[in-house]
Amino acid sequence: MLHLIFQSPIETALLERIDSGDVAVFLENAVLRVLQNSSISDTLTRQLGNARLCVLSDDIAMRGIIPDELVKGLEVIDYADLVELTANNPVIQSWT
């Protein structure tokens, strides 16, 4: 399943719904919550062992965030990668 996370702040309960093998993409203001010092950074780090967690490069750039500020292990993707993820995942859940 592909999770598109726009929600800010991000609830821990939402992150617990991401199953093994899922992909989660943090978009828009949700990228502000995936910084290393965020309140959910520990939860994100635990999820990295189970799921693929991504942020959209344009969204972090627009907010002045550099990849080194993100939780270690998050993957920075571009729009082409996002399109590929949506095409390859038959089930998509948007969280707003």
Image (cartoon, rainbow, N blue to C red):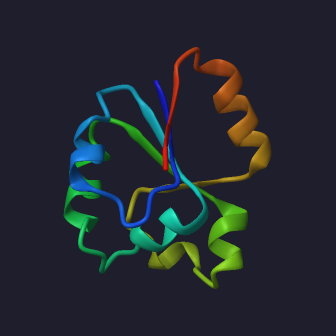
Pinpoint residue 13: horizontal percent, then vertical percent. 21, 47
Q: Is residue 42 left or right of residue 15?
A: left
The answer to which quarter of the image holds residue 56 is bottom right
Q: Nearer the viewer, residue 17 or 72?
A: 17
Residue 85 appears in the picture as rendered: yes
Give coordinates of residue 27: x percent, y percent: 58, 57
Horizontal relation, residue 27 to residue 1: left or right: right
Query: Which residue appears farthest toward the bottom when viewing the image?
Result: 64
Q: Is residue 20 placed above or below 46 in the rendered structure? A: above
- Corner quadrant of residue 85: top right
Query: Residue at image x 69%, y 75%?
Result: 61
Res. 34 visible in picture: no
Q: Quadrant of residue 80?
A: top right
Residue at the location (75% across, 35% down)?
A: 83
Looking at the picture, tell me which residue is in the foreground, 64 or 66.
64
Residue ID at (66%, 66%): 59
Count of residue discs: 0
> Is 58 drawn above or below residue 47 in the view shown?
below
User: In the picture provided, is 41 more to the left or to the right than 6?
Assistant: left
Answer above or below: position of 68 versus 45: below
State the residue in front, 5 or 35.
5
Q: Residue shown at 27%/35% (left/top)?
A: 17
Nearest the viewer among 52 and 14 is 14
